[in-house]
Amino acid sequence: AHLGRIAAVDARVHAFLHVDAEGALAAARAVDARRAAGEPLGPLAGVPLALKDVLTQEGVPTTCGSRILEGWRPPYDATVTRRLKEAGVVILGKTNMDEFAMGSSTEHSAYGPTHNPWDLDRIPGGSGGGSAAAVAAYEAPVAIGTDTGGSIRQPAAVTGTVGVKPTYGGVSRYGLVALASSLDQAGPCSRTVLDAALLHAVVGGHDPLDSTSIDAPVPPVVEAARAGDVRGLRVGLVEELSGEGFQPGVRQRFEEAVALLEGLGAEVVRVSCPRFEDALAAYYLVLPSECSSNLAKFDAMRFGLRVGDDGERSAEEVMALTRDAGFGDEVKRRIVLGTYALSSGYYDAYYGQAQKVRTLVARDFAAAFEQVDVLVSPTAPTTAFRLGEKLDDPLAMYLNDVATIPANLAGLPAMSLPVGLSPDDGLPVGLQVMAPAMADDRLYRTGAALE
Ligand code: GLN
């Protein structure tokens, strides 16, 4: 049914870069065989899923939305992919994304943008717009995204779906093509909070193949999603993340949802996190720095594309031609920025300062969590904007991430869930819940209460 739905709508939505119909049907049959053999199966066995094209799946093309990886078929599964397969999840295909996960609109994909199913002239968010759109358009009931600065949560907000960035280290990064290694985290996209929890429980947990993986059990996310009880929960409303710059319709739906939490027995207080105002600037130094280093491996020798290799040119020339042809403008912009920020003489002034701000953001969170159990804000300042609207203005695009970035800088878990349609334009609005490290269950508890 889902392959049929993809065939019917994906020419317009363009959520997928690659549909693996054969592999999906084989996986579904394998689950049937396991069931027939009386094997005990988990709740996601046989459930179709869309996988963001930044996670490897053995033998299936993985492009990260970039030309530079064209033709690359990874010889191994990411840990997330392997765990999905073991749980009997049926992987339908790989979803579209901003190139190497850089962007907030999926317009930076080398393979063309994804369209928001609510209004095809609008962006589905980014970088994981393909995963969110696939879920919103009923092409897949659940999907996996990755979130470095909001790429699971902001697409969820603008497509009316649920998206969760787990605690940093809660889900293995093995086989996740790195954007910024100290920020990246894979997580669930779904239609309901419980579906997200079930997926989180399957992909999460310790992995010796990732040195930053936390050696502790997955927080009790499924139990929390089933309970959904917020009585006595202390909810902090982040003052810096709901005022100026946020659309009136977004603020209205957000405030109504907070009032609902209060009505359900939560205790709502206002909390100030003053350094959140510097988080965006710090992020856009830390991220380019890390990605300029991570993307150095795409050197025309090891993966995918190779341009100008005529037997005469030097390796350096081939490398330069390949990187020029293979990377898009946004990727080049960030490589240049990051290389500059890390260069001798500038390191202390830029990267060093940004790391200090990062510590201050983490301290703001720590102080806030002495008073409250969770923090809330709108997920994004606006509803889905029009395709092309911010494409030529990188700064306007970056400003979209103002509410999502603090959680990445501090490594904390955060969720976006739909809280209705904006009265301004009838488009979905997302509410963000943030929690202390390894208290991911509080996101589900809060989210399920609001659902
Ligand atoms: N929009 C952010 C950026 O462009 C988020 C990226 C992400 O989370 N992968 O960096």
Image: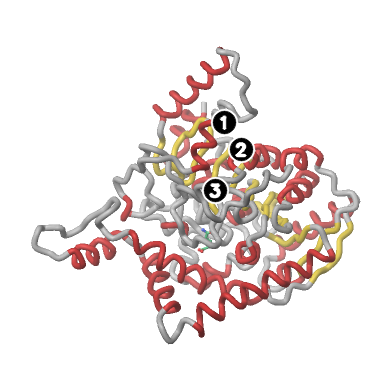
Decide if residue 177 is on the left or right side of residue 445.
Answer: left
Q: Nearer the viewer, residue 386 or 234?
A: 234
Q: Nearer the viewer, residue 208 or 432?
A: 208
Which one is in front in this view, the residue at disc 3 or the one at disc 2?
Answer: 3
Classify residue 278 by image quadrant: bottom right
Q: Amino acid at mark 1?
A: Ala
Measured along the vertical axis of the image, is residue 377 above or below residue 141?
below
Measured along the vertical axis of the image, is residue 163 above or below residue 104?
above
Query: Residue 185's spot in the image, x, y percent?
Result: 56, 54
Which one is in front in this view, the residue at disc 1 or the one at disc 3?
Answer: 3
* Residues at marks 3 and 2, CA–CA distance in whole angstroms: 11 Å
Residue named by callout 2: 202
Q: Please say if the residues under marks 1 and 2 sit with CB atoms less than 8 Å apart.
A: yes
Q: Residue furthest bottom?
A: 345
Classify residue 321 by image quadrant: bottom left
* Residues at marks 1 and 2, CA–CA distance in whole angstroms: 7 Å
Q: Residue furthest left?
A: 312
Q: Amino acid at mark 3?
A: Ser
Residue found 78% across the figure and 73% down from its top: 272
Does the residue tagged 3 have its C-beta within 8 Å of any atom of ligand 1?
A: no
Q: Secondary structure at mark 2?
A: helix
Query: What mark, if any, has residue 172 been given in the picture?
Result: 3
Residue named by callout 1: 87
For the residue carrying disc 2, how many other residues have a C-alpha within 10 Å: few (<14), some (14-19), or many (20+)?
Answer: many
Query: Residue 73's spot in the image, x, y percent?
Result: 33, 42
Q: Amino acid at mark 2?
A: Val
Q: Earlier in the sequence, mark 1 or mark 3?
A: 1
Residue found 39% across the figure and 38% down from its top: 58
